Image: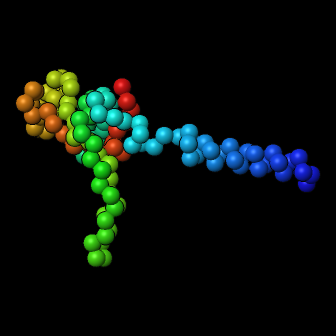
Amino acid sequence: MDGKSVACADRHKHISLYRGKHRTPSLSQMYKKGDVVLVRSLAGDAIPHIHVRLCKKITQKPKEYGQFSDKGYVAWESTLIYKGESVILRKEWSIPYRYPDKMELFVFEEDIIKKI
């Protein structure tokens, strides 16, 4: 192998490391307070996706409890924003959301599908 191809390989290695560390935002950097996002339900795919507004971020770091360990999570306190979605969840799925009083929910960041 000549010196030129080694230099190219090193350069590409440096670029890929740079992309991995600095260019790709983590999930926690993608969302902020006030964002409107589409989320899926923890209960399963049969329940329709809903739109929520993110209110307060909650970060739980991993913990050890003797033999047990908790992997930690990132979640959001959020509110439903469309009355129609709350009606569908209440009538078809018996999920007790009532517009405008009981619209708060807890969303894990891994259940967010996309930012609207």
Quarter residue 88 falls in = top left
Identify the residue at horizontal 89%, vertical 46% (top origin).
4
The quadrant of the image that shows the C terminus is top left
Provide residue 68's location: percent of width, then percent of height: 30, 72
Identify the residue at horizontal 41%, vertical 36% (top origin).
30
Identify the residue at horizontal 62%, vertical 44% (top origin).
18
Say whether residue 92 is visible: no
Provide residue 113's location: percent of width, then percent of height: 37, 36
Identify the residue at horizontal 53%, vertical 40% (top origin).
24
Seen from the viewer's position, the closer of residues 39 and 25 is 25
Q: Is residue 96 left or right of residue 44?
A: left
The quadrant of the image that shows the N terminus is bottom right
- Number of marks in picture: 0
Provide residue 44's location: percent of width, then percent of height: 28, 44
Q: Is residue 68 above or below residue 10?
A: below
The scheme the figure's colours follow is rainbow
Say whether residue 61 is visible: yes
Name the residue at the bottom extreme: 66
Provide residue 58's location: percent of width, then percent of height: 27, 47
Seen from the viewer's position, the closer of residues 87 and 114 is 114
Q: Is residue 62 above or below residue 73?
A: below
